Image (spheres, rainbow, N blue to C red):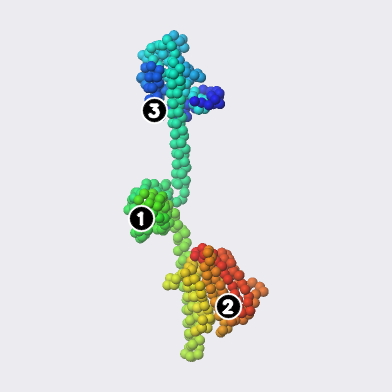
Amino acid sequence: MASEAAASRVYSEAERLVALARFDAHALAGDPELARITRFAAQLCGAGSAAVSLVEAEHQRFIASAGLSETETPRSTSFCAHAMLEPDLFEVLDTTADPRFAQFALVTGEANVRYYVGAPLISEEGASLGALCVTDTQSRDAPLSEFQREGLAVLAQAVMHRLHAHRQANAADAELQQSADRLQFMLDSVPDIAWSAAPGPVWDYFNARFTEVTGRSALRSVDDWRDVIHPEDFEATLVKFETAMTTASFFEDEWRLKQADGGYRWVISRAVPSTDDPETARWFGTLTDIHDRYRISQERELVAGELAHRIKNVFSVINGLVILHAGKDPILRGFANTLSDHIRALSRAQEFALKIDGDHSDTLKELLNVLMAPYGVPGQSAVSINGDDAITIGARSATPLALVFHEFATNSAKYGALSVAEGTVTINVARAQDSVAIGWCESGGPSAEKPTDTGFGSRLVKMSVEHQLGGAIAYDWREDGLVSEITIPSERLSQ
């Protein structure tokens, strides 16, 4: 029933019709719950027929009834149009004796309605919608009993509960549909291809971008993907995807996707399972175009490779010149061989920094060994490297590290411990909880003095450590030589 506040509001006819339309009650025609209510209402009142009547602008419509053949009548001859405006039950004991209704078609026609009682149907907002009515072909001498009146009022409330539940369900469905439409719009608007697959896997969804890019409407099975993945890439990525499905784990790979025009573009393919159960997991994936980035990366690798090749050639030319000028002089030949070894070590360090040679492990100590090899006196342990052997480095961190320690070693060879035969350098590598400390300790060389100005080398070291590696560097200028410690976050070191 309507609340007191809602019931106190007076609805205009236009507002009432809007409120009625929001129930979409026509969809409830033949509703089994309303049919049971009307049958029970007729039995409760000992009458031949009952109906749920909704009063529209021109007609009243019976969305559920028992004992009635009519589905609608004109509003102008509607009993319920009167009943819905009453605060309580509206009862007419003898319709032929009531001048308001005596000439209605339901009274004079085949329906032969002689008795009518209606319980108004009022929305929660207080709008009159119609009535739960009971009719009979026999007039009555006495009104319904209090028990019957209360029962009919309860049944009218049950009708309204059903109507409200239907309206709420429609509103929820509409909201879900709006949400689905927004999601679909978003998926169709993004530049990536999005897809989903049922366990199996069986692909059951692709966004509009897939058709735009490939010219195909959909794929269903794994084998269907063979038509859109480059033949050289299909088998390798299939193995990776099958592994991901078997373990219900994240999948990522790069391959070439066939375009609508027949060409291919590189994409990065990612997919995640909905659960960790390989048998029941649904899969959700994306294809992101990386062709331009891939092409630029290839071009950069080509340039880097060419640069590395040219630098290596420079080292080779220098090496050749050293050997050539040494000639057959045994003294110069020994010196040339030693210098040649140093030059080759410098070339090796350059190759490591440019990541073009894969026959070494990518560990910090390995890089330091390569960088320090050219320094010191042959046959003596001028440089010792101690500490953790398992600290790995990434491609991004190798170059700034090489620059830093090449600068340290060069300065030490010119002015520090490595410039004298008895001088030594100790490098210690230690892992902390989330960082790595690299200690540089010179001894046996000239006294270290703090420079009065910052040269290019110092600025290069500072930029490499702090900006590129996100770390910090500290210096201690001692009488026995320079001591320095570099601290780098482990995460940045592994990049």
Earlier in the chain: of badge 2 and badge 1, it is 1
At label 2, which amino acid type do we have?
Glu
Q: Which residue is farthest right?
A: 452
Labels 3 and 1 touching (C-beta < 8 A): no
Q: Is residue 105 above or below residue 336?
A: above
The location of residue 444, given as percent across then percent down, is 59, 82
Please name whichever residue, 99 or 334, is drawn nearer the observer in this view of the structure: 99
Labels 2 and 3 touching (C-beta < 8 A): no
Mark 2 Cα shell of 10 Å, populated few (<14), some (14-19), many (≥20)? many
Q: CA distance from mark 2 to mark 1?
A: 55 Å
Earlier in the chain: of badge 3 and badge 1, it is 3
Q: Residue at x 61, y 78 (%)?
A: 481
Q: Secondary structure at mark 3?
A: helix
At label 3, which amino acid type do we have?
Glu
The location of residue 294, given as percent across then percent down, is 45, 60
**Residue 64 image label:** none
Earlier in the chain: of badge 2 and badge 3, it is 3
Labels 2 and 1 touching (C-beta < 8 A): no
**Residue 246 image label:** 1
Q: Is residue 355 above or below residue 416?
A: above
**Residue 33 image label:** 3
Q: Residue at x 36, y 52 (%)?
A: 278
Q: CA distance from mark 3 to mark 1?
A: 49 Å
Q: Which residue is mark 2?
A: 442
Q: Residue at x 53, y 24 (%)?
A: 7
At label 1, which amino acid type do we have?
Thr
Q: Residue at x 63, y 79 (%)?
A: 479
On the question of residue 240 being in view, the answer is: yes
Q: CA distance from mark 2 to mark 3?
A: 93 Å
Q: Secondary structure at mark 1?
A: helix
Mark 3 Cα shell of 10 Å, populated few (<14), some (14-19), many (≥20)? few
Q: Is residue 12 above or below residue 225?
A: above
